[in-house]
Amino acid sequence: MQDKVTIITGASSGIGKALAEEAHKRGAKVILSARRKEMLDELASSWNAEDYLNVQADVTREEDCFKLIEAAVEKFGRIDVLINNAGISMRALFADVDLDVIRRLMDTNFWGTVYCTKYALPYLLKTKGSLVGVSSVAGYKGLPGRTGYSASKFAMHGLLEVIRIENIKKGLHVLIACPGFTSSNIRNIALSKDGSSQGETPLDENKLMPAEAVASHICNAIEKRKNSLVLTAMGKTTVLLNKFFPKFMDGMVYNHMAKEPDSPFK
């Protein structure tokens, strides 16, 4: 990724922050985007000003995504990599959830990817660059209690797969990266059934893959121009078994998620 102009959305924390640090370490010119610019400034405080650009943007706003892409091109003249990482999660039964929660999930996870990709695509085609979606195993297998999250990730998969096929003769690289459960703040800020923040993760974060390891795997996959990446033994097993035994996996996934502390179902 040496000297590759790389845009990362949701770069203020979690996997996005780890991706920013990893890409910078590998010599990329990094454009960091998030709603909280002060956190981006803190992250890049020791970096050379010529190597990065911080842009405050809310990916649910189309105009913000347009300005993000234009700012990157204005400073660096091109785009080599776009990593659509910004995302939020939720935990609630579909029967109980406020529909606005699902809209918010789709606006961030899916439409944020649509907007940024739409405006970056002409530049990525010029450089035969990489388009990346940081998705989830929830984009392969529906996770109970995560209706909006799984729906948004399934939608992201469909979007990116079609873009890959449409540009198969133009040299565009499209990567769908699916971490398993990762130690990050996404569960702490996940939305409950009424849209309020969950506040406390239901998982033991110390037993999950570190965000830094996820970032390293994603950057390796970008450099190798892989089409897909599925991480953790549980994630790989879930995706594999679901291909052949989907009904069996329905029960396995239900039982696993039901064991979470304060699970919305039993």
Image: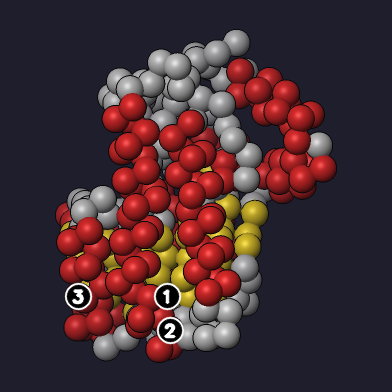
Residue under numbered circle 2: 125
Q: Earlier in the sequence, mark 1 or mark 3?
A: 3
User: Quick check: 209 above or below 129?
Assistant: above
Q: Earlier in the sequence, mark 3 or mark 2?
A: 3
Residue under numbered circle 1: 81
Query: Considering the numbered disc 1 on the image, is that residue within a helix, a strand or a loop?
Result: strand
Viewer-nearest residue: 235 or 249: 249
Residue 37 relative to residue 213: left or right: left
Q: Residue at x 32, y 37 (%)?
A: 103
Q: Earlier in the sequence, mark 2 or mark 1?
A: 1
Which of pointers 3 and 2 indicates the residue nearer the eye?
2
Mark 1–mark 3 Cα distance, whole angstroms, equals: 14 Å
Residue 41 found in image quarter: bottom left
Residue under numbered circle 3: 71
* Crowd band around label 1 with a 10 angstrom C-alpha radius: few (<14), some (14–19), many (20+): many
Give the residue type that dot 2 points to: Leu
Q: Is residue 1 in sight in this rendering?
A: no
Q: Residue at x 36, y 40 (%)?
A: 105
Residue 135 pos. (x, y %): 51, 52
* Crowd band around label 2 with a 10 angstrom C-alpha radius: few (<14), some (14–19), many (20+): some
